Image (cartoon, grey):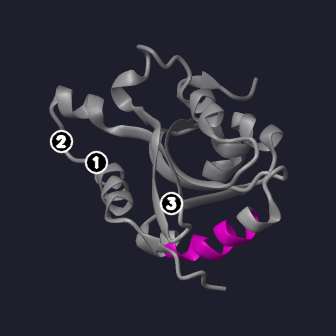
Amino acid sequence: MASGVMVSDDVVKVFNDMKVRHQLSPEEAKKRKKAVIFCLSDDKKTIILEPGKEILQGDVGCNVEDPYKTFVKMLPRNDCRYALYDALYETKETKKEDLVFVFWAPEEASLKSKMIYASSKDAIRKRFTGIKHEWQTNTYDDINDPCNLADKLGGNTVVSLEGKSLRS
């Protein structure tokens, strides 16, 4: 089901910047996005960056103590969103960093919002080539528990997320 919604060039640029991990100067690394949220424009015709809804790598450890919890708090309780989250996690063997595409469709969102976001998801997903992890979540309890994200990243092999132990 296609909605005819377009994806803004800014959204694609942010994705490409987050996806490509090349040598960055310390100053550039601080400006790299850790998480970003996308929404529909007011006219519902374009997927855009939601103003002010991002976490920069340089914020982590300074004014953002727990990037995952901060990311979750940025999501609206009663409307849908798309997001990219750059997850830093550790398995039993190694440390990893992967982008996760999140489709947030809370139960409290209107039916109209759920329908337009669901029908537009393919448009943004096609522009995000190379995403290994996709997560659709519908309840705050589900997205608020970092173990659920860990399950998407590698199940019970994931032992920590953002430096915080998940399983004892």
Residue at the left extreme, as displayed: 25
Q: Is residue 160 visible?
A: no
Q: Secondary structure at mark 1?
A: loop
For residue 117: magenta? Answer: yes
Up-down: is 80 above or below 126? above
Q: Which residue is mark 2?
A: 23
**Lower sequence index among marks 3 and 2:** 2
Secondary structure mostly taken by the magenta-highlighted segment of the chain: helix
Q: Residue at x 58, y 32 (%)?
A: 68
Q: Quadrant of residue 73?
A: top right
Q: Nearer the viewer, residue 38 or 143?
A: 38
For residue 168: magenta? Answer: no
Q: Choose mark 1 or mark 3, whichever is in front.
A: 3
| CA gap, disc 1 and disc 3 | 29 Å
Q: Secondary structure at mark 3?
A: loop
Please provide percent x and percent y for residue 35. 47, 41
Q: Residue at x 20, y 34 (%)?
A: 28
**Residue type at numbered disc 1:** Arg
**Residue type at numbered disc 3:** Ser
Up-down: is 135 above or below 27? below
Residue at the bottom extreme, as displayed: 1
| CA gap, disc 2 and disc 1 | 7 Å
Q: Which residue is mark 1?
A: 21
Q: Secondary structure at mark 2?
A: loop
The reply to whether discs 3 and 2 touch (Cβ–Cβ < 8 Å) is no
Tally the marks.
3
**Lower sequence index among marks 1 and 3:** 1
Q: Nearer the viewer, residue 130 or 101?
A: 101
Tell whether 14 sits left or right of 51. Answer: left
Range of the magenta residues? 114-123
Q: Residue at x 80, y 58 (%)?
A: 110
**Residue type at numbered disc 2:** Gln
